[in-house]
Image (spheres, grey):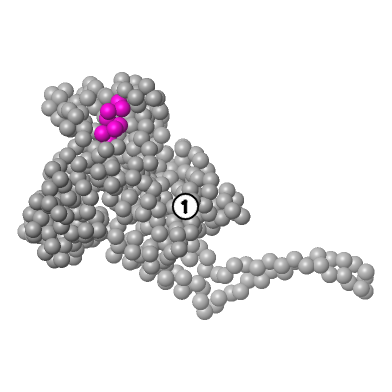
């Protein structure tokens, strides 16, 4: 879609490293040229923290920086309709940085790793659980109270309690209307385990579209709350008396034809070897990208005794005390739930980490298996001379003197290098 009939302004926005949308309203008559040639924006936008303070980024915001513009590529297929706007000003397009700035642009990174996955014949399918707390507070009242003794929208813990859900039916309805306008697929919404604590589930669906939808939901939910005289908070631990808030990632893989790669009815727990290797890669390499799951000081307050935050990089079947929870009972639903990401994590960077871990897992598997499989044979033989029977065991190990699996190792190394590039 390009210019829609009646457009006056359209908004072009990027996703910053915090998952916030930053953009500008542009005259609709200029849109065809922008879609064709792009538009400029300073990559310094990606160095802003959530309070709009510039972080020190070499060559971008440090003493040597000139705060130049880099070119944005506008995704013409990404148009959505923003709520709360006049229809003539409601068009929103996602854009991403090109050139050197693409190396730290969340949407560019996600697009890159998804393209690598497609080359491998893999399509990720994802969904997000987005947890937040709704306060009966405005920015002015929050400041006046010094961010203490805050009033939540409901007074008590109310996990799945219909009394509070019905009490807040107007809010739930407005959230559903907002999501529908933005084209967000909401799977479910419900009360959680604290006062004002709620959860909304986005997806499941194609990885790039679902990550965009999660970003849209978090940004525009804050707008909805502000318009209601309330505040929606995605802090992982806004109070030590409150439970922790997360943004769990549900992930499965399909092949190029759309068939599930994690399901194998003949294997234990119906988990394919691909699935087990995938989880092994996550366990081994997710620690390297933990700062993307827990990007702020407040994030680390979530990992405390007495909360549902995972204490280690463990996995289990239908076990919410682990980091990686295997869930689903059929080919179309089997998946892994990554319970590490905090509520303030950027959905597009959270999705990127899974592919990063997968690439490293391939290298690890290749290195751990430098020789072909050991082959064992069992047979029976009768010896006529002694009239004895015997069981024969044979063991063969083809030794790759000139190979040592170097081809697979080099292939895995190249794949990982491309992911990092």
- Whether residue 271 appears in this view of the structure is yes
Q: Secondary structure at mark 1?
A: helix
Compared with 156, 92 (above or below) is below
Corner quadrant of residue 390: bottom right
Q: Is residue 223 above or below residue 46?
A: above
- Residue 366 inside the magenta-drawn segment: no
Q: Is residue 349 above or below residue 102?
A: above
In-image side of 84 versus 131 (left or right) = left
Q: For this rendering, which residue is in front, 420 or 7? A: 7
Question: 16 or 21, which lies in front?
Answer: 21
Q: Report the residue at 89% width, 72% height from top.
A: 383
Closest to the observer, 3 or 253: 3
Q: Quadrant of residue 2?
A: bottom left
What is the crowding at mark 1: few (fewer than 14 residues within 10 Å), some, or many (at least 20)?
many
- Left or right: 278 in relation to 392: left
Q: In x, y percent, where is residue 103?
A: 23, 60
Q: Residue at x 12, y 47 (%)?
A: 89
User: Main SS type for the magenta part?
Assistant: helix
- Give percent across and percent down for residue 325: 47, 43
The residue at the point 49 percent across, 44 percent down is 327
**Front position in the image: 162 or 383:** 162
Farthest residue, direction front = 5
The answer to whether residue 194 is left or right of residue 27 is: right
Which residues lie in the magenta part?
Answer: 168-175
Whether residue 38 is visible, yes or no, is no
For mark 1, what is the residue?
279
Q: Position of residue 396 (x, y in %)?
A: 66, 71
């Amino acid at each position: 879609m390009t210019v829609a009939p009646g457009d006056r302004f359209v908004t072009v926005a990027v996703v910053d490293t915090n998952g916030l949308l930053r953009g500008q309203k542009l005259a609709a008559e200029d849109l065809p040229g922008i879609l064709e040639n792009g538009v400029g924006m300073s990559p310094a936008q990606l160095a802003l923290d959530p309070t709009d303070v510039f972080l020190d980024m070499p060559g971008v915001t440090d003493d040597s920086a000139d705060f130049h513009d880099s070119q944005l590529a506008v995704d013409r297929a990404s148009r959505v309709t923003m709520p709360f706007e006049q229809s003539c000003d409601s068009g929103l397009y996602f854009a991403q940085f090109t050139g050197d700035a693409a190396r730290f642009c969340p949407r560019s990174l996600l697009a890159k790793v998804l393209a690598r996955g497609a080359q491998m014949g893999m399509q990720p399918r994802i969904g997000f659980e987005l947890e937040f707390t709704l306060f009966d507070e405005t920015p002015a009242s929050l400041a006046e109270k010094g961010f203490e003794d805050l009033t939540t929208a409901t007074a008590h813990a109310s996990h799945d309690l219909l009394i509070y859900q019905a009490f807040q039916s107007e809010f739930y309805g407005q959230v559903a209307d907002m999501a529908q306008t933005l084209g967000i697929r909401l799977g479910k919404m419900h009360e959680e385990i604290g006062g004002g604590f709620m959860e909304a589930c986005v997806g499941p669906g194609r990885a790039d579209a679902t990550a965009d939808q999660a970003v849209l939901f978090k940004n525009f939910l804050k707008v909805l709350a502000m318009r209601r005289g309330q505040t929606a908070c995605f802090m992982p631990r806004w109070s030590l008396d409150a439970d922790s808030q997360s943004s769990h990632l549900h992930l499965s893989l399909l092949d190029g034809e759309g068939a599930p790669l994690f399901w194998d009815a003949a294997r234990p727990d119906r988990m394919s070897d691909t699935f087990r290797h995938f989880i092994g890669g996550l366990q081994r390499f997710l620690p390297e990208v933990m700062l993307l799951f827990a990007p702020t000081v407040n994030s680390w307050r979530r990992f405390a005794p007495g909360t549902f935050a995972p204490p280690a990089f463990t996995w289990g079947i239908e076990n919410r005390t682990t980091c990686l929870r295997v869930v689903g009972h059929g080919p179309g639903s089997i998946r892994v739930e990554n319970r590490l990401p905090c509520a303030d994590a950027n959905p597009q960077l959270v999705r990127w980490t899974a592919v990063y871990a997968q690439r490293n897992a391939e290298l690890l598997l290749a290195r751990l298996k430098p020789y072909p499989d050991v082959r064992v044979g069992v047979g029976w033989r009768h010896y006529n001379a002694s009239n004895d029977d015997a069981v024969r065991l044979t063991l063969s190990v083809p030794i790759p003197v000139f190979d040592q699996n170097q081809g697979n190792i080099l292939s895995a190394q190249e794949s990982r290098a491309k992911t990092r590039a």
